[in-house]
Image (cartoon, rainbow, N blue to C red):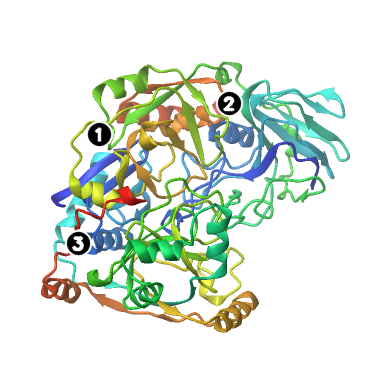
Amino acid sequence: MIYESPMFRTLGDTALNVEFGDETSIPLNFRILALDQAIRKNPPKGILETNPQVRSLGIVYNPLVNTRDRIVDAIRELTQSLRAVERLPSRRVTIPALYDDPWSRECAEAFGVRNNMEYIAEFNRMTVAQVIETHTACDYWVTGVGFVPGTFVSYAMDPRKRIGAPLYRTPRTWTHSRLLNFGGNTSTIYPFRVPGGGQLFGRTPINIFEPEQKNRVFKDGPVLARTGDRHRYVSISRDDYDAIRAEVEAGVYEYQIEEGVFDCAAYLAWLDDLGEPREKRDPESTWERA
Amino acid sequence: MLEVIDGGLQTTVQDMGRQGSMALGIPPSGAQDAFSLRIANLLVGNPTGGPLVIRDDPGSAGLEILLGRLKVRALKDLVVALTGAKLDVTIDGAPAPRWQAFWLRAGQTLACGITREGARAYLAVHGGIDVPVYLGSRATHMRGQFGGFEGRVLRQGDRLSIGPARLDVASLVGRRLRPDLLPRHAAPWEVRVVRGPEADTFTEQSETTFYATAWKLNPKSDRTGMRFIGPALSFRPGRPRYLIDDAGQDPSNIAIDPGAPLGTIQVPSGVEPIVLGVDSPTIGGYARIGTVISTDMATLGQARPFEAVRFVRCTWVAAVAALREQHALISESSVLA
């Protein structure tokens, strides 16, 4: 649910969480991002950094410069003007992907589980081809960036296209880099070789984390994703995958990114017109089946 | 220049860490025992940074030496200081002091023994370890393979550049920390905690148990997180349905969320509380029973595997007072020349 007014959670002496609700939804995330923008534009004294995530805004501050109470008051004031979020800056990023790839299969085999893509298809009562068709059929809203450097959390913007699969019960000790995966109803990509419990279903040839910042897309930082980006996945062949990978390694790949502004109000109206609840709540779809 | 003869178990270049990149999934990194590194820098006349991790003020970089055994040779005359965990330190075999600035002359070898009390020692060099600044800091983030020296632990043969020296560098020699300020590095450790956002999701009995237990540091702990062995904690019944759907079946699952700040204590499935460390993931997903106060993260950085740690309830006001008090110690009045 979305709260009447935001809640401020104390995290020790140097951090706060501002919570607008305890559900995970794109409408709630709009409010977090709008507040994040407002703080970045006009930071109250003492705030060192913000960390916008799906349902809350993390704040790190220096309590020797300003008290928590005064920071809370300043943020509360900023939220007054954010009741209805009209527009947010949002880039549209195209992510090419080789679906049902050999590296995801290899990971599944190494950890003694079945090919994750087949499991995902079965869990969503689809064929593998339908999973690919559905995952490439709508934009994904990036509600938060993080966990390990470069990774992110994103949700299908069309609730009718929302698919997913429960996390592994026991996480893998390693995963190949750049693998697409579902964790519940969120879609993400592992930036480099890390442990993890997401269900693997494809690999992108593009870097989402490039610490050496070779490509000019990384000139301002080593991470591709920004909170509030819209991601659109495109299914590619193995030949395309290899060709794009070669360009990425040479640092010359043209990342497909459109800068823009997203009309949140129109999107929310569209969601209402769909006549479906904004968040699908299927009582059968708990994670017990994992 | 400083040449590494033996990198020991895990030695990394660290400063006070990088601020402002959490929204990219990048944790602060930096020294786990920030107090010891700041004192080492103070003794050799370097910028100390802080009081927390402050944007653009990470202070000078030094070496964080986990459990000892580092061996380095100076390739020019340097003024250095070693602080933090208790270990034997020698220059060409002769005993050298701790918590005091001294000469390490060109060609001399500084050798650290194994730590006897505490877990992490810090070596500061006048001028600072001069590795490239990455996103505002020289701190090493090993998993991301960036920052520090080539984004990794130090190995035999590595050569570390040292920043430019002041003219009166000789005057720094002999500067030492006032003896009454020397930290006590021995178990049982006491670590202060401010109550966390999901403390209410635990049963009252379990919250009492959390503060009454002498927890043992799990040896699998590292800069990402410190895990504690002890009794299982349980959760109150009656979790709302939508939270089960959104976040997961386990009563410790909260919706994916920034558990990020240093010191957050998460308790997945009620088993083995984890204190998030300087290299931790920037998003958590488990019930947060409390947060270790920023001052005591330095203390926790000295706990050794299987040592006892007690968590002590603390108010936000007391936590800020502790920070102010510790920050005030980073000054010339703490130094005997």
Give the amino acid at mark 3: Glu
Q: Amino acid at mark 1?
A: Thr
Q: Please tell me whether residue B30 is drawn above or below residue A251 in the rendered image.
A: above
- The quadrant in which residue A253 appears is bottom right
Measured from the top left, where is residue B256 in percent x and y? Answer: 33, 51
Q: Is residue A10 left or right of residue B167?
A: left
Q: Badge 1 is on which residue?
A: B201
* Circle on res. B131: none
Q: At x 46% / y 48%, what residue is drawn?
A: B281
Identify residue for label 2: B305
Q: Give, as a three-letter code, the residue at label 2.
A: Pro
Secondary structure under badge 1? helix
Foreground mark, 1 or 3? 3
- The chain carrying label 2 is B
Give residue B21's position: percent from left, percent from top: 46, 56
Residue plotted at (40% across, 66% down): A226
Camera-side residue of A60 and A148: A148
Near-viewer residue (B123 or B88): B88
Q: Secondary structure at mark 2?
A: loop
Q: Is residue B191 above or below residue B31?
A: above
Say yes or no: labels 2 and 1 on the same chain: yes
Residues A95 and B66: in front is: A95
| Chain identity of mark 1 | B
**Residue under pointer 3:** A279
User: Marks 1 and 3, Cα distance to the nearest angstrom?
Assistant: 25 Å
Against B327, residue A233 (above or below) is below
Query: With B323 as the anchor, is A126 left or right in this view?
Result: left
Q: CA distance from mark 2 to mark 3?
A: 45 Å
